[in-house]
Amino acid sequence: MNHVPEIRRYRPADREAVARICLLTAAGGGDATGVYSDDTLMPEVFALPYVEYAPELAFVVADEERVLGYVLGVADTADFIEWWKREWTPGFAARHPSVASPTAHDPAFTEADLVGAGLDPERMRIAELADYPAHLHIDLLPELQGMGFGRRLIDALRAALAARGVAAVHLGMDAANTGARAFYDRLGFHELPSSTPNAPLLGIATS
Ligand SMILES: CC(C)(COP(=O)(O)OP(=O)(O)OC[C@H]1O[C@@H](n2cnc3c(N)ncnc32)[C@H](O)[C@@H]1OP(=O)(O)O)[C@@H](O)C(=O)NCCC(=O)NCCS
């Protein structure tokens, strides 16, 4: 059996694995299991809407047995915001009708912040959207990190966006995730004007 991981397009059967990887990398790059009252919250905000809305812009790293990492993108964030309000918010609000009490983990990005993010797609309307209409999320399990797959996933998404005529892509990140910041800097991402030290906002051309 071939156990060498490869990059391929997302398939619907990858959905649960994507949700799991999101949870396992969501605490400043580390495992967020149990950090919030409900482990489904994080993927329902930062992964599943993406594969639902734009499965064609999701790429995974997988061997024959399992998925080990992904990059998820949307080409037109403004359109995604409208889709989210229409298609995602109602189900999310029904599944998470109230903000539960914080867990003992007491994260800086609180339970209320996370539920609020699920209900408020307008948070994605950055000032630079006209020039950087696309955005992305990338996460790899620890065993796959540092082997060049992150760079290759970003390359795959940038190429797919460029092929659709999208000139540039952005991302928001946790300021505490210094490893990810070093990765983005190395790949040539730059800070956008509305980036702040507490909420870094980075962008890059697609070609
Ligand atoms: C951040 C992440 C996507 C990077 O992917 P990766 O596959 O580990 O990175 P790569 O091996 O492709 O590295 C690409 C380049 O960035 C550099 N780099 C990557 N991580 C780095 C780090 N922590 N410190 C310094 N440089 C780093 C590499 O040295 C490499 O440089 P080179 O290509 O010139 O040799 C991955 O580590 C990850 O998923 N981390 C956990 C989840 C996370 O933090 N996601 C991002 C949330 S915003």
Image (cartoon, rainbow, N blue to C red):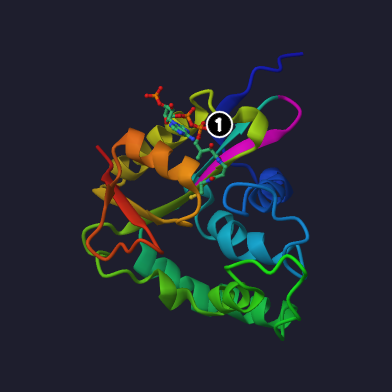
Few, some or many residues within 10 Å of mark 1 (<14, 14–19, 20+): some
As drawn, 62 above or below 25: above
Location of mark 1 (residue): 8
Foreground: 165 or 121? 121
Asked whether the viewer can see residue 82, the reply is no
Q: Is residue 52 magenta?
A: no
Q: Quadrant of the N terminus?
A: top right
Magenta region: which residues?
Answer: 64-72
Q: Position of residue 131 (x, y in %)?
A: 21, 58
Q: Position of residue 181 (x, y in %)?
A: 41, 44
Foreground: 39 or 161? 39
Q: Is residue 70 magenta?
A: yes
Q: What residue is at 32 percent from the left and 64 percent from the top? A: 196
Left or right, residue 148 beside residue 192: right
* The residue at label 1 has a CB less than 8 Å from ligand 1: no
Q: What residue is at 57 percent from the left and 75 percent from the top? A: 113
Q: Quadrant of residue 161?
A: top left
